[in-house]
Image: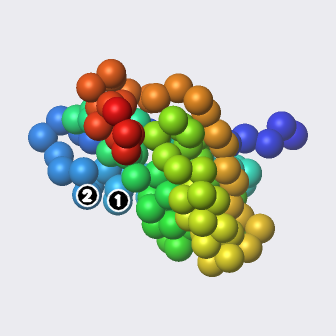
Amino acid sequence: MIPLSVLDLAPVCEGAAPGQAFANMLDLARHAERWGYRRYWLAEHHNMPGIASAATSVLIGHVAGGTSSIRVGAGGIMLPNHSPLQVAEQFGTLASLYPGRIDLGLGRTPGTDHATARALRRYF
């Protein structure tokens, strides 16, 4: 059987709060785990009202803490938006908290519009 994964953007339903998107995300992750999916990926997107996955590493911790065996990861962390040291520290911490269950995917696109990309960078 081909190993299956889920890629989640934590969509915010019209009229709902981001907190509901996080509850839905955890519910989906628990179902994916129960159904035998191998991984649960979270994508990084910024300044998008319909997507609540801006703080990817925080959400990975939320999903990993609410599940027991499914691998959880970033698909992916956009390196132009983050210090490589911070990414290493965050994912090292997650890997220590959830051994053998954390994956790190990296990308090089800003993952957002130009104005938000500038705001994410320390020096612009």
Image position of 89 with respect to 75: above or below:
below
Give percent across and percent down for residue 49: 22, 35
Which quarter of the figure has residue 9?
top left
Instruction: Find disc 2 in the rendering and name its residue.
Output: 19
The 10 Å Cα crowd at callout 1, few under 14, some 14 to 19, many 20 or more, is some
Horizontally, is 104 left or right of 62 in the view?
right
Instruction: Find disc 1 in the rendering and name its residue.
Output: 23
Give percent across and percent down for residue 6: 60, 42
Which quarter of the figure has residue 45?
top left
Instruction: Give the structural element (helix, strand or loop) at label 1.
Output: helix
Give percent across and percent down for residue 57: 50, 58
Give percent across and percent down for residue 43: 50, 40
Q: Nearer the viewer, mark 1 or mark 2?
A: 2
The answer to which of 52 and 14 lies nearer the viewer is 52
Horizontally, is 107 left or right of 38 in the view?
left
At 66% from the left and 67% from the top, the residue drawn is 92
The disc placed on residue 69 is: none
Image position of 124 with respect to 91: above or below:
above
At 53% from the left and 73% from the top, the residue drawn is 65
The 10 Å Cα crowd at callout 2, few under 14, some 14 to 19, many 20 or more, is few
The answer to which of 47 and 9 lies nearer the viewer is 47
* Residue 67 at least partly seen: no
* Residue 118 at least partly seen: yes
Label pair 1/2, CB-CB below 8 angstroms: yes
Horizontally, is 105 left or right of 77 in the view?
right
Image position of 86 with respect to 65: above or below:
above
